[in-house]
Image: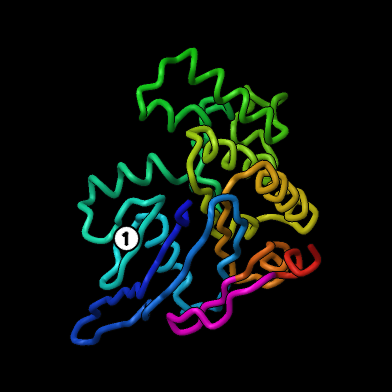
Amino acid sequence: MPPLIEMTGVSRHYRMGEETVLALDGIDLSISNGEMVAIVGSSGSGKTTLMNVMGCLDTPTGGRYRLNGNPVEGLSDDDLSGLRNREIGFVFQNFQLLSRATALKNVELPLVYRSVPRAERRARAEAVLTRVGLGHRLAHRSHELSGGQRQRVAIARALVSQPSLLLADEPTGNLDSATVNDIMALFQELHLAGNTIVIVTHEQALADRCPRVVRLADGHVVADGPGRAGAAA
């Protein structure tokens, strides 16, 4: 099978006044279905730009990007939106949940946008919340949940559409160390179940728990190999 993510010579330039900022410079990257990969780098390394391109929130200035066989470069905003909705589930550092909605309603939301019938929405949302260990918290609102539980709701929401790629941006940045362990254990369970997971982080300790680590610096891939989890395996 072709790679889920295939980037060849991907660059991204930004104009700031009369200056051109080179955020990504000739990125070659391939990620297969079922991999769990950390994208790591310091501030200014290009990892946020890479995440935006990988997540179809932005398009390359140059090079080629294929997501599950779909060419991304040159797509219109509407086409990018459609590709995101079909292929990607996002998990963010600040959870981005609706505070007045229950866990169940938060997880159902992507299916509402897809016009999935109500009974099917509820059944799928209940199933995925149970999968992440929150089957007993369906009716709790966001403010009634701990930080770790809110992130589990966010992960369930990302999974409910059965995306090809789970893309997590600093997913443990607002959590204490014990909860970080719980969330990373959940990601590892999902990975073992066959989900493709990319975690974007500046924390080396978090990256080391992934089987593969891609390191960026100054818009380049400077290292690509097994993390401690991969080396141990």
* Residue drawn 30% across the image and 42% down it: 82
**Depth order, front residue of 44/191:** 191
Which amino acid type is shown beneath numbered disc 1?
Asp
Local crowd at mark 1 within 10 Å, few (<14), some, or many (≥20)?
some
Q: Where does the magenta region start and end?
A: 214-226
Q: Position of residue 88 (x, y in %)?
A: 45, 46
* Residue drawn 53% across the image and 56% down it: 32
- Hey, which quadrant is residue 124 in on the image? top right
Tell which residue pokes out farthest to the top in this image: 119
Query: In the figure, is residue 132 to the left or right of 28?
Result: right
Q: Position of residue 199 (x, y in %)?
A: 58, 59
Q: Position of residue 51 (x, y in %)?
A: 45, 62
| Magenta highlight on residue 130 | no
* Residue drawn 51% across the image and 31% down it: 106
Query: Relative to 41, does residue 114 appear above or below in the rendering?
Result: above
Q: Please give the residue where the numbered disc 1 appears in the rendered image.
A: 58
Q: Quadrant of the C terminus?
A: bottom right
* Residue drawn 20% across the image and 82% down it: 17
**Depth order, front residue of 166/69:** 69
Tell which residue pokes out farthest to the bottom in this image: 19
Query: In the figure, is residue 221 to the left or right of 112?
Result: right
| Magenta highlight on residue 225 | yes
Query: In the figure, is residue 22 to the left or right of 228?
Result: left
- Hey, which quadrant is residue 7 in on the image? bottom left
- Quick check: can you spot residue 100? no
Q: Position of residue 170 (x, y in %)?
A: 58, 60
- Quick check: can you spot residue 132? yes
